[in-house]
Image (tube, rainbow, N blue to C red):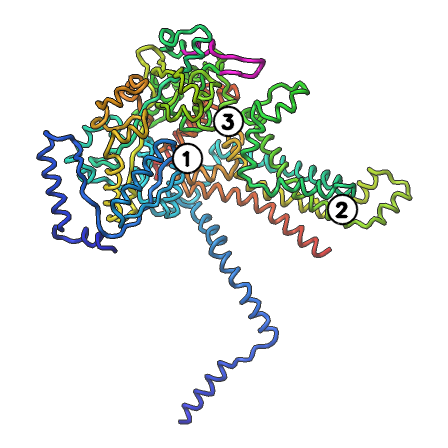
Amino acid sequence: MDRTDESTSCSFVSRRDFLRSAAVGVGAALAPSVPRVASAQSGPTKTPVKLTFWTWENPQQRPYQHKRIQQFMQQYPNISIEFQYFTFTDLGKKVSVGYATGTAPDGFATGDWLMPTWLSRKLIAPLDVSLLGYPSLDAFRDDHAAAFVAGCIHGGKAYGHPTWFYGFQNWANTKHFKEVGLDPVKDEPRTWEELGEVAKRLTIKKGDRFERQGFKFAMHAAQWTMIQFNPILLQAGGQWFDGTGKCTVNNAAGVRAMQIRASIAKKYGAEDPADSQATPPVPWMDWLRERCSMFSSVPMGPGAIKPINPTMDREGYYRAYQMPGVTADKRYSTCYGFNLVVNAQASKAKQEVLHHVYRYMMSDLVDVWRATAPLTLARKSGWTDHPEVKGAANIDAIIRSKDTGMFLPRTPVWNELADAMHRAVQKVLLANGDPKQALDEAAAEVDRATAEFKKG
Amino acid sequence: MQTQTETLSRCSALTRVRLSYRQRIRAWGIGFILPAILFFAFFKYGPMLWAFWLSFTSYDMVGTPRLVGFDNFTSVVHDPVFIQALNNTLVYIAGSTALITLIALLLALAVSQRVPGSRAYMSGMFLSNVMPIVAVCLVWRFLLHPHGLVNQMLSPLGLGRIDWLTDTSLAMPAIVGVTVWRFAPYFMVVFVAAIMAIPSDFYEAAEIDGAARWGRFRHITIPLIMPQVFFVIVVSALLSARIFLMPFLITGGGPGGATRVLSMLVYETGFSYMKMGRAAAISVALFAIALVFTVLQMRLFMRGEED
């Protein structure tokens, strides 16, 4: 047991505890007159601490997190953090394996859809919001999008420090629009039917080969299947589970959603699902290389566009629309975000230091925006009013999709649900499967998983 | 004083226990193999036994395993996902074993003709086996793309576009094809060695008796390389039963679960769904399949030794 552990086990109030309580008290007293997150940050322990932190690979977010962690280590040389990253789709599995083998990191970033997985198994520790700069849990809750923090607050305790959080937009190549006589402003597709018609006009085929796809759904990973199917299901009036926890994706609304999902390829002939399935690079790569005209994606900016297609970046022939809806008044997409969480198996000393690390990582939101724009953030304060944010291209569609977005189902059988739905979509789109039968199989699979989870 | 002397002499007698020559040889032998025994006990058989025990428990990798009897086995055999994965595994084993054996034999016959360049040809073929499996899978994923090189090479035949990896009926044959491409040259070497070991007198005598090429192959080559044929069948089936990376990296088990084999299901169930007990039950089923081939292989070796 190191010194910090000893101090936490003492029955009397330590000097650090006293200072922390005093700081929280002062913070609470000043709350109405200062920004909700105090800018000054108290230092962590002076004892040497070695931490491990895992995150996901992304050309903007991963380097930013790495940079902030390195800066933190420079400020506190007694703290060493081993930084590792994995692909977006692999991170959750790697962490699971880590827990199974006793090699899970002390802290890690996680998609908010995985929070029930960690929480139901008590794998992550509750956070002390005062160490994150908030006087109370309510202040923490108020400073973030309600639906997002709902996923990280459990039993009156916060379990995740929200970072980035964004919706999906329909990214369109306006040059392609003009080539086929479409007006990028007037012909913005507002419903899935309109999107199908527009995509059909944008499609170029040579025999059985697509020279250009009008619109493209990502087919390469279960997470993407869920991200794309989720809003269509909700727009069609469906839901993932009923009140008893039974999977209801196979009801009439679910079947309609699947038909809409498949329509771009099957009804409008504007998409090649086999092509998308067979080449899983970065999902939006085909749009960046102008092999497809529209693609639903998280916010994209010059940082993502320029390295792949400098001409598109230079001439600016792209535009972000809100995603279409079943009807024009239901134009919402999936929203998701990432939490920084603490391994419940890490020592108390490490858990406390991680609070300081996380707070430091996300303490300067304008700096975060500069480094990762136009990826939006979960926090309400500290960035949206900044001129650099307000002046960003496509910012209206980007912010609106974040504010109106729908969340992925929060369930402890998330992985089973995502895999079952991925197979259902593949069966319908690649094997001409019947939507109802494919969804029946998926729902049955999810119900079996839920029953087993409940059995314990 | 006398008692002390007696005790001392008894101790020295104990330390100087004389072992027979046979006992000493045995002791040395045990000493030499002990590290290997301990290694396998701790890192192979120990985990295997633990996995076997886990198959009777409910364990989410975090809490303590809870005994559930045969629950995992009964729920697994009624699970359509398991049935599909089992079918896929058996189809894969049958397809890849048959084709590996056939192609390896044909390659070996071609190489053993002792024509100029045959050694270089053999070395070239063997390269597919030394390439890293991840690189092989990624390259094949692009080759088998709807607009990939394979389809482009087939287009003069008027076959049109073939969705190798996204058509549910073609994805498994495609994986089998990649497996054959990788492993057939490896087993070719086994056949080449066997064919080269056949005395040329046999062929000369058959030729004098008027035997044609096919007759010589059927009545001399095949009977004399039969032990190697059995060996290749058993070992390639054993390798196929444990296949994981190829379907995992090339198709991810898709489309619609068409290439999801048992080892992938074990991985998903254990490490993605955190159901280690259930994953262990599936791995016991996989173990049973592998055991059948292992027993066959051992019998084959024993018969070979007796011969």
The residue type indicated by label 1 comes to Thr
Q: Which mark is residue A87?
A: 1
Where residue B143 sits, quadrant-wise, is top right
Residue located at (23% from left, 35% from top): A363
x%, y% of residue B176? 60, 34
x%, y% of residue B148? 58, 25
Closest to the camera, between mark 2 and mark 1, is 1
Where residue B72 sits, quadrant-wise, is top left
Closest to the camera, between mark 3 and mark 2, is 3
Question: Is label 1 on the same chain as label 3?
Answer: yes
Residue located at (39% from left, 34% from top): A57
Q: Tell which residue pokes out farthest to the bottom in this image.
A: B1
Stretch in magenta: A195-212
The residue type indicated by label 2 comes to Ile
Q: Chain of mark 3?
A: A
x%, y% of residue A159? 25, 37
Is B74 in front, or is A53? A53
Q: Residues within 10 Å of mark 3 (few under 14, many from 20)?
A: some
Residue behind mark 3:
A279
